[in-house]
Image (cartoon, rainbow, N blue to C red):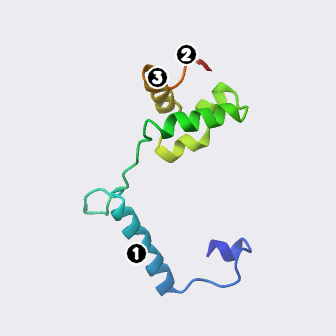
């Protein structure tokens, strides 16, 4: 419906198409283990944590794009994993302990090398 209002498409999806897409999406979430147990009001979506390969790769990628350290910490890509800036800082500390990145932080200041 919003696609029609935004001018992206000219026709509405049928109720059957909407139901099928919902089914496919739920099936994909289930196949990848991203849905929690069935509850009275539905199933919660389980967030995933980045692996020890993904997190440093994303951090390095953002760093070598020329973004500032604070911008890396607050970048929207971290929200894909359900991270807020505090969670991202905690993840960076873990990466530092593993020797993946060099990071210094004090109060609200962060430096990534």
Mark sitting on residue 105 = 2
Q: Is residue 84 visible?
A: no
Q: Quadrant of residue 111?
A: top right
- Residue 61, numbered label: none
Instruction: Determine which quarter of the picture holds residue 45.
Output: bottom left
Which of 32 and 42 lies nearest the eye of the viewer? 32
Q: Are marks 3 and 1 in contact (CB under 8 Å)?
A: no
Count of numbered circles on the image: 3
| 18 up-or-down from 46: above or below | below
- Residue under the image location 36 percent in, 59 percent down: 32
Q: Contact, CB < 8 Å: mark 3 with mark 2?
A: yes
Q: Position of residue 1 (x, y in %)?
A: 61, 76
- Dot 3 or dot 1: first in sequence order is 1
Task: Identify the residue position indicated by label 1 in the image.
Answer: 23
Distance from the alpha carbon under mark 2 to that under mark 1 = 45 Å
Count residues near mark 1 (Cα–Cα under 10 Å), then give few for <14, some for 14-19, many for 20+.
few
């Amino acid at each position: 419906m919003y696609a029609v209002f935004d001018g992206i498409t000219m026709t509405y999806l049928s109720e059957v198409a909407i139901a099928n897409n919902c089914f496919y999406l739920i099936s994909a979430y289930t196949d990848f283990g991203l849905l929690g147990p069935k509850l009275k009001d539905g199933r919660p979506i389980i967030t995933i944590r980045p692996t020890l390969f993904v997190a440093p790769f994303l951090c390095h990628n953002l760093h070598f794009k020329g973004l500032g350290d604070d911008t890396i910490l607050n970048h929207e890509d971290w929200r894909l994993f359900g991270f807020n800036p505090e969670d991202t800082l905690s993840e960076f500390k873990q990466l530092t302990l593993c020797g993946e990145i060099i990071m210094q932080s004090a109060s609200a200041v962060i430096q990534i090398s």
